[in-house]
Amino acid sequence: MMMFLFLHSLRTFESTLRVLTSSALILSFLFSERPAASATGMTSDTDDLPALLSIKAHLHPPASLSSWDSHNSSTAFCQWPGVTCGNSQNPGRVTSLDLANLGLTGSISPDIGNLTFLRSLNLSLNSLQGQLPPELGRLSHLESLLLSRNALEGRIPGTLANCSSLWRISLGSNRLAGEIPAALGALPKLQILSLHYNDIGGRIPASLGNLSSMTHIDLVGNRVTGTIPPSLGRLQSLVHISVTGNSLTGAIPANIFNMSSLCYLYVGYNQLSGTLPPDMGNTLVNLEVLQAFGNTLEGPLPISLPNASRLTEIVLPYNRLSGPLPRDIGRLRYLSSLSLRDNRLEAKKAEDWEFLASLANCSNLRTLDLGYNKLEGTLPAAIANLSTQLKWLGLGGNEIHGSIPAGIGSFTHLHRLYLDQMALAGDIPAAIGKLQNLHILSLNGNRLSGVLPSTVGNLTQLERLYLNDNSLQGEIPKSFHNLQRLTVCDLSFNELEGSIPKELAELSSLTRYLNLSHNLLTGPLPSEFGSLKNLQVLDISDNRLSGEIPSTLGECQVLQYLYLQRNHLQGTIPDSLSSLGGIQVLDLSCNYLSGPIPLTFERLQHMKFLNLSLNDLQGQVPDQGGFKNANLYSVAGNDKLCGGIQELHLQPCSRLVPGNKCGSPAVRSPISFVFIVSLLVLSLGKASYLVRKQRTRIYMPAGPSKRQTSILEVRPGGRSM
Ligand SMILES: *[C@@H]1O[C@H](CO)[C@@H](O)[C@H](O)[C@H]1NC(C)=O
Ligand SMILES: *[C@@H]1O[C@H](CO)[C@@H](O)[C@H](O)[C@H]1NC(C)=O
Ligand SMILES: *[C@@H]1O[C@H](CO)[C@@H](O)[C@H](O)[C@H]1NC(C)=O
Ligand SMILES: *[C@@H]1O[C@H](CO)[C@@H](O)[C@H](O)[C@H]1NC(C)=O
Ligand SMILES: *[C@@H]1O[C@H](CO)[C@@H](O)[C@H](O)[C@H]1NC(C)=O
Ligand SMILES: *[C@@H]1O[C@H](CO)[C@@H](O)[C@H](O)[C@H]1NC(C)=O
Ligand SMILES: *[C@@H]1O[C@H](CO)[C@@H](O)[C@H](O)[C@H]1NC(C)=O
Ligand SMILES: *[C@@H]1O[C@H](CO)[C@@H](O)[C@H](O)[C@H]1NC(C)=O
Ligand SMILES: *[C@@H]1O[C@H](CO)[C@@H](O)[C@H](O)[C@H]1NC(C)=O
Ligand SMILES: *[C@@H]1O[C@H](CO)[C@@H](O)[C@H](O)[C@H]1NC(C)=O
Ligand SMILES: *[C@@H]1O[C@H](CO)[C@@H](O)[C@H](O)[C@H]1NC(C)=O
């Protein structure tokens, strides 16, 4: 899934590029009206005219090449747009064909193999289909083959190995399959091999290690398997290896870490294992980017890493790296990203934390993500000395205690702050409100107490707020009104009191969920909740809310889950709730609701569970629609209900009505008495939910904290076209 997202975002990026680079000039030339000479009367007294006409005939729409018609002289085609011919030695022979970015469809004519003087072919950024013609192998002068960003399919023809002048092959973003032909290892001049975002499988041929001129190899986003061949380590000019997002296994060959030429190593999202050699910082002296996220690398971070002084990005999250971080990592002057989330890195002693103080020297640091490791101790004061340019700070999921320093307010560029799932105590400092660029604030799963500061309302860019599972007190500040971009808000499992401010209930930006459950909130449900027109989940269960359910709740048109159980709600269930067309779970149990079950609930088609139990509802239980299936709802513990389907074993309504005056139906039959007592025992059992950390979550999967997001933001390997 993550892989998909990250591929998808790149493709979006590409298509944007496609639009931006549209060569409007050539297009207008091509489309310009000219007297079109009849194609039948042509004379073929040069080699290349028939091939060009064949190429044209394979392309669509023909209009885009309408000016490829005049042949008033034998070499007139040399003036055709996109065509370049040779100099005086080879007049009338096509040496370059550039039809990039013209919106062409169709296929590549096999007759292209007749343009034997062709040196450069650029058909990139079109929508060409079909296979690469094997006849390309006849182009022995071809230096540059640029076909990226089309819809080409089939295999890469092995005949390309005959194009002995090739230095650049660029076939990225097509639908090519098959394997990389081992024969390509015979191209003596090849420098750039770019095959990203195709469907290419098989292994990386060891023969590529013969390409001594090779500088770039880019296989990002394919299905390549097997190991990285050690022969690649022989390539003394290699600058750039990108194999992110394949199925490579085994260890990264030791001699890859010996390549002094290497600047960019992108090997993320594979199944690579093994360790990073301790001296790699001394051997990869030119390394700028090390990206190997989402593998199973283990062992310590190389102690020599700070010697690789050009490093800007160390991106190794989601591996099994262990041990402490190099203490002098801050010697990496240009470091902008240090992302080590979800490893087993340790800090046990004070010295193990020295790396943090040294990072103060990295003035370009933008991302520091050390979340979900085994760092222990108090949050070091040195954190306040990190670059104020920091955009992403992640320390969550470690065993860090202490309080959040007020100095946090100086990181005014922060977009994301993850300090979740630790043992932080004390207040949330009011200075948090200075983080005016914050998009995500994650402080959940700590022991934070005190009042929720109203300055949170100053975080006007905030999109996701996780403060759940703490001991926050006081009221929900009215300043929440300013959080106009908030899509997720989780304040559950705290000790918040007072009533729900209408300012919160009005935030129509809320889409994913609003969770206020397990607090001490009182007062009525604000009728403003009807403004939450885009909200999918609303959970206000386990509070002390009273009053009636506002009928405006029916206006939350996309609501799928509504939890109001275990409150003190009274009155009748508003009919309007049946306009919640997408509702899947509606839990109103354990309240003091009275009156009838709205008959209109029968038409709630997507209902997976309707819980009305333990209220004071009366009258007839509907028996149509969803009510035909007893597994989809519970009405237990409402002793004034009657009718419904057989399985409910309720009294028929006709008998109940006259019996009403003769005492409570609950004691009428010993069976139902026992039943209700056991229900009460059950619900008492449920109250022990309040004993925190031990509770079960009955409705949705785990909270937001564990694998939150960071990997999506990891940039993949750069690449060449
Ligand atoms: C291209 O060359 C092949 C082989 O020489 C020949 O059979 C074919 O007719 C040529 N195509 C055109 C369009 O001239
Ligand atoms: C032939 O056609 C080209 C393109 O239309 C034009 O530039 C050129 O002047 C013409 N040459 C002759 C000899 O008519
Ligand atoms: C090929 O075409 C693309 C798109 O127009 C252009 O960006 C690129 O520079 C061209 N490459 C060469 C080598 O001409
Ligand atoms: C490639 O070269 C080999 C030997 O040099 C030759 O046998 C083969 O026909 C060539 N293939 C093409 C497609 O030109
Ligand atoms: C090319 O590489 C392969 C595998 O690494 C090797 O067996 C072969 O001898 C090499 N060929 C040349 C011409 O170097
Ligand atoms: C790395 O290079 C050094 C010196 O050139 C050499 O001694 C060593 O064997 C190489 N290591 C590997 C794994 O290739
Ligand atoms: C870092 O480089 C220096 C100078 O080349 C060297 O003396 C030192 O041993 C290296 N550090 C490590 C940990 O390899
Ligand atoms: C930062 O760099 C300076 C100069 O290189 C050095 O003296 C200082 O110790 C470094 N600070 C830290 C915290 O590493
Ligand atoms: C932060 O930096 C200042 C100035 O360089 C220094 O005096 C102070 O000791 C540093 N604080 C920590 C905790 O490293
Ligand atoms: C921040 O919030 C407080 C309290 O809500 C408010 O008084 C103050 O003016 C706000 N500051 C800024 C810069 O918006
Ligand atoms: C709050 O509710 C949402 C939506 O049901 C859920 O995803 C989230 O895990 C809940 N929070 C806690 C702390 O249970």
Image: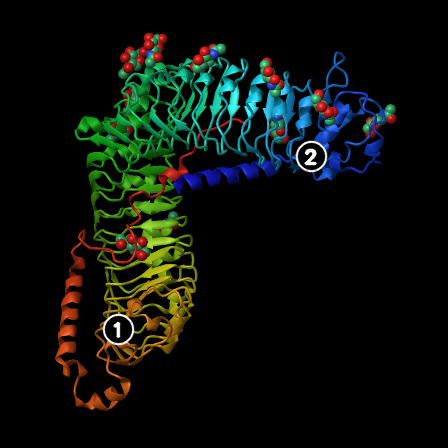
- Location of the C terminus by quadrant is top right
- Disc 1, SS: loop
Please say if 659 is above or below 291. Answer: below
Where residue 77 sits in the image (x, y, percent)?
Answer: 78, 25
The residue closer to the viewer here, 73 or 712, is 73
- Ligand 11 sits in which quadrant? bottom left
Q: Residue sitting at 83 percent across and 33 percent down?
A: 40
Numbered disc in front, either 2 or 1 = 2
The residue closer to the viewer here, 272 or 182, is 182
Q: Left or right: 29 with respect to 347?
A: right
Q: Residue sitting at 30 percent across and 40 percent down?
A: 408
Where residue 106 sits in the image (x, y, percent)?
Answer: 65, 37
Callout 1 crowding tier (Cα within 10 Å): few <14, some 14–19, many ≥20: many
Which residue in the structure is indicated by mark 1? 635
Q: Quadrant of residue 94?
A: top right
Please say if 506 is above or below 180. Answer: below
Residue 413 appears in view: no
